[in-house]
Image (tube, coloured by chain):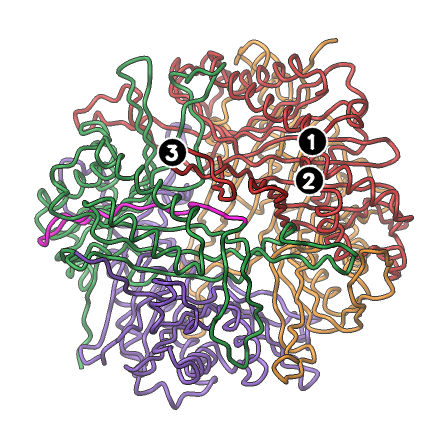
Chain colours: A purple, B orange, C red, D green
Amino acid sequence: MAITLSGDQYGKAETHLVRIVRDTARHEIRDLTVTTALRGDFADAYLVGDQSKVLPTDTQKNTVYAFAKSRGVASPESFGLELARHLVAETAPVSGARIEIQEDAWERILVDGAEHDHSFVRRGTETRTVAVTVDASGEHVIGGLRDLTILKSTGSEFHDFLVDEYTTLEPTSDRVMATALEARWRFDPAAVAGRSGADWDASYARIRAILLREFATLQSLALQQTLWHMGRAVLIELPEVVEIRMAAPNKHHFVVDLSRFGLENPNEVFHADDRPYGLIEAQVARDDAPPAGEAWRTTAGGFA
Amino acid sequence: MAITLSGDQYGKAETHLVRIVRDTARHEIRDLTVTTALRGDFADAYLVGDQSKVLPTDTQKNTVYAFAKSRGVASPESFGLELARHLVAETAPVSGARIEIQEDAWERILVDGAEHDHSFVRRGTETRTVAVTVDASGEHVIGGLRDLTILKSTGSEFHDFLVDEYTTLEPTSDRVMATALEARWRFDPAAVAGRSGADWDASYARIRAILLREFATLQSLALQQTLWHMGRAVLIELPEVVEIRMAAPNKHHFVVDLSRFGLENPNEVFHADDRPYGLIEAQVARDDAPPAGEAWRTTAGGFA
Amino acid sequence: MAITLSGDQYGKAETHLVRIVRDTARHEIRDLTVTTALRGDFADAYLVGDQSKVLPTDTQKNTVYAFAKSRGVASPESFGLELARHLVAETAPVSGARIEIQEDAWERILVDGAEHDHSFVRRGTETRTVAVTVDASGEHVIGGLRDLTILKSTGSEFHDFLVDEYTTLEPTSDRVMATALEARWRFDPAAVAGRSGADWDASYARIRAILLREFATLQSLALQQTLWHMGRAVLIELPEVVEIRMAAPNKHHFVVDLSRFGLENPNEVFHADDRPYGLIEAQVARDDAPPAGEAWRTTAGGFA
Amino acid sequence: MAITLSGDQYGKAETHLVRIVRDTARHEIRDLTVTTALRGDFADAYLVGDQSKVLPTDTQKNTVYAFAKSRGVASPESFGLELARHLVAETAPVSGARIEIQEDAWERILVDGAEHDHSFVRRGTETRTVAVTVDASGEHVIGGLRDLTILKSTGSEFHDFLVDEYTTLEPTSDRVMATALEARWRFDPAAVAGRSGADWDASYARIRAILLREFATLQSLALQQTLWHMGRAVLIELPEVVEIRMAAPNKHHFVVDLSRFGLENPNEVFHADDRPYGLIEAQVARDDAPPAGEAWRTTAGGFA
């Protein structure tokens, strides 16, 4: 019996970069938290403590900041691609680079109805996410968002489910449905090379709008069904996306029993519970989607 | 020497209430997290375990839900007032009631440019806060917000400060200034009784806009100065507000030294640091502000 | 009508300092997160942006680190006192200094039953807290802890409480009682000057043990009663403490109804709920306690 | 081109169960947060909203509570196995069940040096984790822990690393090394069936002790090397473990430059930084480890 090492990966997590473009009086801002990870031939660092093939995580952080100046941040996707390509091309022991980015959005402060040139307020609750992987299999870009918190006060049903000896849930034809959606969509590798920052931003805005539209307009028979319709619509409308994965907590809103106080409660007063919550997942893909390679391998140690 | 009890206060914290108004197809939503606390003659519960004067915290929770139906939620301020008045008036041992509310805002999902009737997405990062106190001294309402995250990429200076043997900070005439503002404003008790839900909502919107405007437009010589201008403007423009208190973390954005890599960095690339951070406070009031009574006493046990 | 400034206070929050003593092979560690705040004549910084009386928060951070070397960290209380005395004595515009510290505890890793010399593992869930205030009224030290998470599986009752139209709670003579205690105790100012680091550590250990003992051994008729017994016992046994304040969330453990599945549940299976929770507060003091001055004024902007 | 569904999985997350054993005056406590997920033939729920094969997540929660009574909680691993076996065996559309559990540890309160019968205080900062998967490939159990926060004040080096144009890090032969370890170990499926609750508890205690011992005693040339030694030692000493995965943030402790204040700082005063941090991963396995099946597939939607 021998004991072997695999899956070694290391990097710098959560470098918080704010990039201002101030070429004119009207400034622009990008607010990124960047995690880099390198994959390659690092076994000697583990087995005998030899660092000669290890580019320090501190260097990776420096590279993030330097590239923010020298290359700029046209979009989180394009910035991640530039970092990953550099780390693979310029560092001999590195066979693959993984860049994970979250972007926090800002919008201009309105003063007397006019957008201010250099003052901003944080927008929305969702975070845009990017995961770029560059290795021998190609260039993989996964866009996404998390904590898109949405609720519909009607238009959701749940009934005719499987019943066993532990089932006490009552069926319903009208309930509140709420979630904090996480979604990640993989772009066609063949489409990655030619895209501009504006292209990436446009895809993000369209996908976000589609997800919201499907959630709002589908008469839902289950959160599962809603996820399927969200994912399918994205694939139908954006040819550059080949796969989408979603996880959605079912944030339960329980109708409070007010009959004890002589009051009716026809779906007007709810207790929004924290835990436990349902957790529904879905993966939707084109059947001709190109191979994902290590696109879905995270920096979380082989477990979530 | 004797040992004495004081400041006893108890209640139910963080009842998460979602109230839907569905009288028409166009639903309305209010999302409140409500904390209630009672003040009064509860010494026997502490000293000898006699609960005969103690209204259970479970009852307080029930009251929150029942009132959401029977009285509605015209605004968090008016809802807090109704709860506090009831608890004081109807519970003999209770001499004072404190209601703290945070409201999370939702906006309608846009589908093809039109607002949806019953589907919503969480808006913004700030939370609206309310603290109502009703007792023998009258009815006190404190409105507020927290986590209003704002940043200006220029228009902020800091120089000519006091220097001692431990001072190494360089003065600057151009820096990023960013904060997550917490502000709380106290209304004139004489103005409380007559206000409608719409009045409370209107005051909130105007104060938020003033705080943003002052932050954006003042050429700042210190975060202290910015806070003063914010607070003063609110008091000048809203006669119903008599006092405002603010706490503002100075969320440091450090210019990254890129000269090591042959790059200039004229305030374009920043490291957004987490900790430590400056913490600046200010209290601004009219000199004829009516007494606050226990309006500022929180439910945090005499310490924050 | 004039608008006035008051309560101005500013400082550096959450400087995370780790101090190692390595004079021998057996190292010692102190892990402190330090917040400093200055009170005094800073109105010009607010009103006109004049910083000439403002010692930068960056300088305050530097002072924390420098003192950790030059004075050492005999205990968080003594370290806070040294910082506060220095800031008041050496900075002319400063009339008062407030130092808040949280200490995270470490214990030695055991290797084959023996304590390791220089390797440590974080201990416990509670955090030790200190708040020192030095100003013209004297030297005030408040010790404390938070997140002392405790539970008793029997020995707790709650019945014979006040009932109104919204009361549905059932009385019980046997329930789980659980809390995450926050407590803060004020030392006699007359006793502060002469105490060593070892004295402060000894007081902390004794108070923690008393709080645990009272929680465990009292047959509780209410959380209020438990808090009173905890506080009173501390004052009886430690003459150097003149006042103690406590806040305790009542972390509800609900007996799950298993009768639907043909099972009894005599207080064996519980749902540990998150929110809402009861929140009980108590303040216990000697009736001859010296004045507190601004000892209880926090760095939280006049609100919690 | 067709659009297809895959990877559908759903369940109830974070059911917080507290189980008391009170057969004698000396009570026992288990505090588990349980997530269940079902895998199987649920496509109709997604595609057409047909719930006839969907066992509600509410039922899964009920099952957790009912089993806590009827089967007891001998250990989190054995409890997870019982749940998973039941869900697969008794629910026709279910082909696989995944149970994830975190256990928070309690220890008895000491009163005058003696362990109390029914009063407990939360222990430690780490959380014990379990992930059980039962499906056609067998029974897979992964034990683990997270947030095991450890620090060594010497005995750690980092030098002779790869240097590029963005490298500014100085090599060191003596630094603080600190991490909050997450580790997960997979048991030999062949060993699962016969193990008792006491066996699972014993394995956990031994592995935790080995991880601490290796961290403490290895003169480390890199966190990578430390992880390797930790993992290898577990595999050598516990024949029932076939694989271990680890992720370790390198929690940087920076030596503060005190020379500006005329002070030396020979590794005594550190700034403990929050972000960014290094993130080091390792997977160590026997080369004859049986197949893992879906043992590593989490409930996180195909992404972490």
Which residue carries the number 3 mark? D105
- The quarter holding residue C84 reads top right
Q: Position of residue A270 (x, y in %)?
A: 41, 42
- Dot 2 corresponds to which residue? C73
Q: Dividing the image into 4 quarters, which one contains the N terminus of chain A?
A: bottom left
Q: CA distance from mark 1 to mark 3?
A: 31 Å
Considering only vertical position in the picture, is D176 above or below A63? above
Residue A98 horizontal/vertical position (percent) = 39, 73
Give the number of the mark in front: 1 or 3: 1
Q: Is residue B64 visible?
A: yes
**Is disc 3 surrounded by few (<14), some (14 to 19) or many (20+) residues within 10 Å?**
some
Residue C136 to residue D120: above or below: below
Label 1, secondary structure: give it: helix
Disc 3: which chain?
D
Range of residues picked out in magenta:
D133-153
Residue in the image at 19% along x and 45% along y: D239
Q: Which residue position holds label 1?
A: C197
Is residue B200 visible to the viewer in this orientation of the structure?
Answer: no
The residue lying toward the viewer, choosing from D153 and B57, is D153
The chain ID associated with circle 2 is C
Magenta stretch prevailing secondary structure: strand
Q: Going 37% across and 63% down the picture, which residue do you hit? A: A48
C236 horizontally vs D252: left or right: right
Mark 2 Cα-neighbour bin, 10 Å: few <14, some 14–19, many ≥20: many
Horizontal side of C280 relative to A286 (left or right) equals right
Q: Earlier in the sequence, mark 2 or mark 1?
A: 2
C200 vs B287, nearest the viewer: C200
For the residue marked with disc 1, what is the amino acid?
Gly
- Give the vertical position of A132 relative to D300 (above or below): below
**SS at circle 3:** loop
Relative to residue B116, is residue B96 drawn left or right? Answer: right
The residue type indicated by label 2 comes to Val
